[in-house]
Image (cartoon, grey):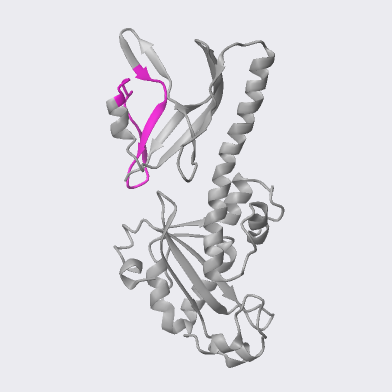
Amino acid sequence: MKPSIAAMGTPADRSEIAFFDLETTFSTPDQPHTILEFGAILVCPKKLKELDHYSTLVRPTDPSLISSFSARRNGITPDAINSAPTFAEIADTVFDILHGRIWAGHNIVKFDCEIIKEAFAEVGQAPPEPKETIDTWALLTQRFGRRAGDMKMATLAEYFELGQQTHRSLDDVRMNLEVLKHCATVLFLVLDACDSAAQKLSMDSGSSSEWQPVVTRKNCFYNYPTARLRIPTTVSGDVTRYDTEICQKGPSGTVQKLASVKFDAAELDSLFKQGTFVDAFLSVDPYDYQQSAGIRLVAKKLIIHPE
């Protein structure tokens, strides 16, 4: 990872997500985990695209920890560890990568974050502090459920057919990012399933309306799935206003409801620019109107994040 990228901006305005992972020695009652490898990628939060990366093996200060383990299946060998820098030698780089950014990783709250703090304490330096922490193990367990068994990274990778987990830091954080992307697509799979069921019910009821699928795919190389989102309106006299509650989130995190937004496509475009983060609270409603039928996502509340 280039120092110009890692140190870019002040902690207050660093927007990149730092996915990171550690490979360590096995712990014993007498010897806690010791870092053998550190790997991280910086990810654009808007496009979930990797911007930069850094990885290095780490040489423990206790030589007995090197000689006591044989070559692992992941390719980390005693010879490779012997020629690696110590944590004290990479501490400034690790600090620059992590400090003031959003941290992300699989099971990092109970494991990687604690070991990072201990490693900095051992070299007599203050540890980096995250802007926020995203533990994908907790996130996916809560939001995605236990469809993939124990929800370990290797199991998730097998579930989504992403290949074998290598247990190397840089490979694992990249796999972690891909797992998140695949979990996001589950929403579209669910919508597709709902759409198929609703279409069958419509046909069985004798409807002659043309069915409009809720999920469409752009005709491009990546075949991105997209979904139509309805923002309902209310008519009062000669004034039409959006029925959806539209709010804006300020830099401090406070959420303020916008005054009742008038029905105006230009005004809506100014609020929802390309790349804007939006928290969307949705419902799925059926419709059958003027020979056009289907199900659609209806926006109940939208929270617009600052750029």
Across and down, in percent, residue 206 comes to 66, 10
Decide: is 240 above or below 19. above
Q: Residue at x 51, y 12 (%)?
A: 289
The front one of 37 and 198 is 198
Compared to residue 67, the image places residue 307 above or below, namely: above
Is residue 278 in sight in this rendering?
A: yes
Q: Which residues are magenta?
A: 241-265
Q: Is residue 35 above or below residue 298?
A: below
In the image, what residue occupies the spot 32% across and 20% down?
263
Residue in front for this viewpoint, 52 or 208: 208
Residue 66, picture quadrant: bottom right
Residue drawn at point x = 47 percent, y = 45 percent = 221
Looking at the rendered image, the quarter that the N terminus falls into is bottom left
Measuring from the top left, give residue 191's x and y in whole percent.
58, 32
Check the image and name the residue furthest to the top: 237
Numbered marks: total: 0
